[in-house]
Image (spheres, grey):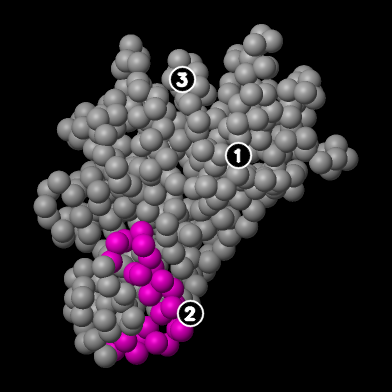
Amino acid sequence: MQDSPLLGQILLGYAPIVGPGGQTSGIQLALMPAQSETRLDAAELLKLLVHAFPGQQMPRGGALLDVLLNIVSESLLDDLMGLQPPPHFGLELPAFMTSGADRAVRFRELHDRQVSLVAKGWSVSSLPESLLQSFHALIVDAADVDLGIDRPPSSGPRKLNTYIEGVRSTAELDLAFASGAQGVLGLPEAQVFPSRAGLASELLVVIELMHLADRKGPFDQMQTLMQSDAALGSRFLRLVNSPAFGWRVEVPSFAHAFLLLGPGRLMKWLALLLVWSVPGEHARPLSRLAVRRGLAMSALARGTGQPNLQDEMFICGVLSLLDKMTGMAFQDLIALLPIPARVQASVTGAAGPYAKHLDLLVAVEEASFAEITEVGESLMIAQGDVNRAVISALAAVRRLEA
């Protein structure tokens, strides 16, 4: 990714934009200056973000925006509106910025320039039709009586494409789309999955492969097992060959991957395959979140120059949501999985060596800026390194899903 001194001058959080069927269709970025008195270079910031999240097409109709920018600084938001953000970026405008005739004129001018404006915290009924036409979308709370998840079908089509935030469960996630919303910001606060008697058969195949790799079992046995599930083998090769991981050569087969990686580093890819293969539309956005965590964890360890540590931290991040994805307790999962003791300790409690790193990424996912600063300082990780790791992970998973 493009480097910039600005990476050390901002605090960054994010939430996935979840579409119908569990597809992650975009990202909401929450951003503020790390020091309140600092006036950031808006042009340089926009250049950095466009490089990380490229796109050319103007969203039309019910299409979701690729990136929503929640700028927690009025001056910085004003500066960005004075530039030309690409159409696939949505600028969130809070309610307090609506007053004044000059604002209305400016919003119409921005709309004419194909700047995608997103109204946040507004009542659509209170907006004049002439102003309403200047916006691409609306963000509302799930509990909003008129516009939230309980919006009656008799209300007719929504006047604006709508994103809903504050969804608390998978049941509310379903209600959000039934109400006519185009997207949900973030994942449900409480993932509610029915308790399962066991894991899906394809996951058991991956776990058996992980055991073979862990004990450096014979390659022929591993290849036979991979070939026993054609869909699984095809998924493995798609993941390995994704531009998200930057291989310089195509990996045409599992045999080639085994030769390149060896059984030790193969474990990282099998952990990725395990998470990516969990069935169910409610598990899909969680699997993408888990991969972002894994990639960010690995990036945070890159400065150590220890590939094995990077792989271990990747595995820790990737597996950190497996209990929520499968409906099984971590203690039961750990009994099935051959994962390092340090990873086990980190995903099951605060005592593990990577537990604080997970805390840091959870704070980023919640856009809890005070906690991001506090945990980052306790780990002695510079803010620029945190942001660099997060943005590279977001961009990589975006490529992985393409």
Q: Nearer the observer, disc 1 or disc 3?
A: 3
Residue 96 occupies which quadrant of the picture?
Answer: top right
Q: Secondary structure at mark 3?
A: helix
Q: Residue 262 in the image: x percent, y percent? A: 19, 76
Between 1 and 375, the one nearer to me in the picture: 1
Residue 167 got which mark? 1
How far apart marks 3 and 2 lie (CA) works out to: 49 Å
The residue at 56%/35% (across/down) is 90
Label 1 neighbour load within 10 Å: few <14, some 14-19, many 20+: many
Q: Secondary structure at mark 1?
A: loop
Which of disc 2 and disc 3 is earlier in sequence? 3
The residue at 61%/50% (across/down) is 19
Look at the picture and state if 100 lies above or below 225.
above
- As for residue 224 lying within the magenta part, the answer is yes
Q: Residue 117 in the image: x percent, y percent? A: 61, 30
Residue denoted by label 3: 79
Residue type at the position of mark 2: Ala
- As for residue 193 lying within the magenta part, the answer is no
Q: Are marks 1 and 2 in contact (CB under 8 Å)?
A: no
Q: Are marks 1 and 3 in contact (CB under 8 Å)?
A: no
Residue type at the position of mark 3: Asp
Span highlighted in magenta in the image: 221-247
Instruction: Pick out the residue farthest to the top.
Output: 100
Residue 110 got which mark? none
Residue denoted by label 2: 231
Residue type at the position of mark 1: Val
Magenta span main SS: helix
How far apart marks 1 and 2 lie (CA) works out to: 33 Å
Label 3 neighbour load within 10 Å: few <14, some 14-19, many 20+: some
